[in-house]
Image (cartoon, coloured by chain):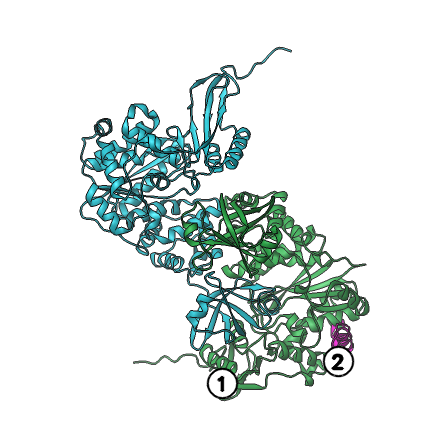
Chain colours: A cyan, B green
Amino acid sequence: MLFLKAKILDIDLENIVLINYDDLKNSQYFSQDRVVIEYKNKEIIAFLYSSKDLINSGEIGLPKKIADELKVKEGDIVNVSHADKPISIQYIKKKMDGNKLKKEEIYTIIDEIVDNNLSNIEISAFITALYINGMDIEEITSMTIRMAETGEMIKWEGQVYDVHSIGGVPGNKYALITVPIIAYTGLKIPKTSSRAITSAAGTADIVEVLTRVNLKVEEIKRVVKETNGCLVWGGALELAPADDITITVERALNIDPKPLLLSSVLSKKLAMGINKLLIDIPLGAKVKNMDEASSLARNFIELGDRLNIYVDCAITYGEQPIGRAIGPALEAKEALLALEDYKKAPNSLVEKAISLSGILLEMGGIAPKGEGKDLAEDILATGKAHDKFMEIIVAQGGEEKTSDEIEVGKYYTDILSPIDGYVTKISNEKITKIAKTAGAPNDKKAGVYLNVKVGNKVEKNDVLFTIYSDSKERLEKAVKLSRLLMPVKVEGMLLKRITRF
Amino acid sequence: MLFLKAKILDIDLENIVLINYDDLKNSQYFSQDRVVIEYKNKEIIAFLYSSKDLINSGEIGLPKKIADELKVKEGDIVNVSHADKPISIQYIKKKMDGNKLKKEEIYTIIDEIVDNNLSNIEISAFITALYINGMDIEEITSMTIRMAETGEMIKWEGQVYDVHSIGGVPGNKYALITVPIIAYTGLKIPKTSSRAITSAAGTADIVEVLTRVNLKVEEIKRVVKETNGCLVWGGALELAPADDITITVERALNIDPKPLLLSSVLSKKLAMGINKLLIDIPLGAKVKNMDEASSLARNFIELGDRLNIYVDCAITYGEQPIGRAIGPALEAKEALLALEDYKKAPNSLVEKAISLSGILLEMGGIAPKGEGKDLAEDILATGKAHDKFMEIIVAQGGEEKTSDEIEVGKYYTDILSPIDGYVTKISNEKITKIAKTAGAPNDKKAGVYLNVKVGNKVEKNDVLFTIYSDSKERLEKAVKLSRLLMPVKVEGMLLKRITRF
């Protein structure tokens, strides 16, 4: 046990205390040890770090928040001792050893994650163990339920519908068209979506060009009551908070273990009170082949059954961007155009939006099997979807706008084809990188507009795509990057010539 | 990319920058993202955290050290963008996927660990992957070599010897006897040891009761030149720094993956320039059975061969503490007593010390095979080991002392046997806990002295052990704990009586 003089620090790092570097080296403690800080029968658990200059020998630096909780004043003597390890550690080890976890064990892990009792080290070990050893459907079910229960839970009267894409394909703004089509028919569709995680624009970023997206639960309920639908940012709610914590670690490791991929999606839908859910699995993006996509779809359906969520899956084409626009404002403009006059909008976007809408209409009993898509097209073609969309936008606090009124980046550069030929490939990853370099999604007006799609014939010096940005400097960086990456591949019909020698 | 106004923080957390909590939530960044902070063509990589109160919207909090490196002053505008992930991530993933790593890949991981390029999340994933998927001897060899090469490397003229215990058994102070026995014969034995990691006293903590232990390389060389031996703290040197970092994470997870157990020991010995090494594997402590011990011994020998270190292993009895004293001063006192008059010292300690010494003398060609132990006993019995020990103590900056002169805790309590019977078990873990609660190793005079060992006959109210401490309060805590834990088990010959009913 150490007895140290409190030095109060005006910093709000949670759960961190600092002692002198030499004190630490000479003690039985190690950097990042979990310790109990005790003062007059109050105690708090924190992680120990060291400092060479800020903290003198014999002192302990306590962030204000910790000092307040302990009622410690500058110069008071506090006790420091080793804290017990969180209970989860043994269950994480059990998973490392390849064993199945019991429901109570999974609940404990999720509870300790949500309560911030687990450090990054421990969460990373859990996620790595899940990646290597996996979980069976029973374990995943327990994890999903607990992830939902530890956050906000929303209830609705009657059935509510939703559509969710597992992502990975740029330009995927179909929800702006699908949600009003569904809502028009009287089905309730309270759509929550995320901001960009690795993409250039999340659905929430796109909708935010037109209206508010950070609505609280009561506002969402009002909007859905008025319009049957909404398009809001899920992050403004406290849905399945464990998921936000595990995603941080998954991102750092560049892995997405299947148990977490499944529980991440369905815990949020369970918390949101969704009864019937359509999941869009773009092929060629996160999922590489039909077998993998089908297996994932079966997992989603089975997990849904156990959670009392009726799940259908649509495996969609995802080997190039959807539509032509990538970036918040550009995508909002394109979606609005599709709602205004769908014949003028890119076919890939319209086709995807009405196909998914069709499935939802059939799931909801609005259209007989096989007739959902036609009904959806009709609702779009007659402007009913457009009007419903405007209702939703206004109900969320925005104003009606036409696609012409949407401003995009004031600086732009056309990227031209170096040769005559055909477009053989457009890389999702490269287009995303270029749009992000131009400033998307934080610069809402930044992005890429594709003048060509795969299969198009082009001539030398035709415009392949245009990069937009509100910053000259970022535009230049993006242009440079696009010359390096060549995201749109143009090839002549003659690919290689082999001659006698 | 974000453009933020610098706010300089007087705190030396390495690699951390803070932005406003709402700014973060509304950006494409996540807590703990690896970011590049750029200012006038200088850049630095750090991890992003958020603060609600300390940092206003539009600001970024930079620890002084980072601000100095970037030459940023309060109020300057810096750029923040996503940093590339460290190269190691893909190799860590490769190990997660169960594949063998190439030498260059392992070198990259170790280099990035030493350079602080990997976060806890990434190091934890690496260690978890090693725990689950293991490494073959070739991979372990590469890891061990690189761990040594990335720190200080010490060279000697001629052969140098060492003895190392993998630990887990309390009271294991044999090195204070073995080192002078070996040094007396002219073999060089520059012994480095650690402070207590989970124990009540590391060898360095014990020696520190008698002399300085934080010697620098040049001092160690001088001491070994003068006396042929030393007993110093390895932590004062920069040996195999990757090991210190991985151990922090292993401790948090309570795991000790075999590849790291092996590389941790041998990287430090390789860096220390050891040619011949005896490894002590106490049975019943970290290693539970003879098969496990033998397998570990074979691994050490094979790894040693690949590193050009001749390794012998001794599997020793470790099911109860070695000798009777646990805690720095108590152990120093007991070791000194053995050197002064070995007949008065506990047999288990003397037996272990001369057995291990005997093996080393045979390894060094000082004694013929089978005769090392007798020679060692002779060196101890005739006081030559004692004189050599005093030489070493003085050369390291201490003064000659007798065992009587070593002070132990001024407060003490005897713990009595509740019944007549026999001592059937003494728990290593429980005795350690009690000694640590009494204050060891930071309170050097705290610890436990065992009046009995397993097999002893005791009568009711005989003293089982005595707890020492320099603090009344801690002594009371330790006494309470020992009543709860009952570390010394006394049972009558009649264990259970079954009667007719």
Q: Say which amino acid is labelled 1.
A: Ser
Left or right of B40 on screen, residue A64: left
Labelled disc at residue B417: 1
Which one is nearer the viewer's eye here, A425 or A110? A425
Q: Say which label, 2 or 1, has the lower sequence index.
A: 2
Q: Chain of mark 1?
A: B
What secondary structure is marked by label 1?
loop
Q: Residue at x 44, y 66 (%)?
A: A65
- Which percent across, then down, holds residue B455? 55, 79
Residue A101 visible in rendering? yes
- Which percent across, then down, holds residue B97? 50, 43
Q: Say which amino acid is labelled 2.
A: Glu
**Magenta region:** B375-400
Which quarter of the figure has residue A280?
top left
Q: Chain of mark 2?
A: B
- Which percent across, then down, holds residue A383? 23, 29
The residue singled out by tag 2 in the image is: B400
Which quarter of the figure has residue B373?
bottom right
What secondary structure is the stretch in magenta mostly built from? helix
Left or right of B435 on screen, residue A333: left
Residue A2 visible in rendering? no
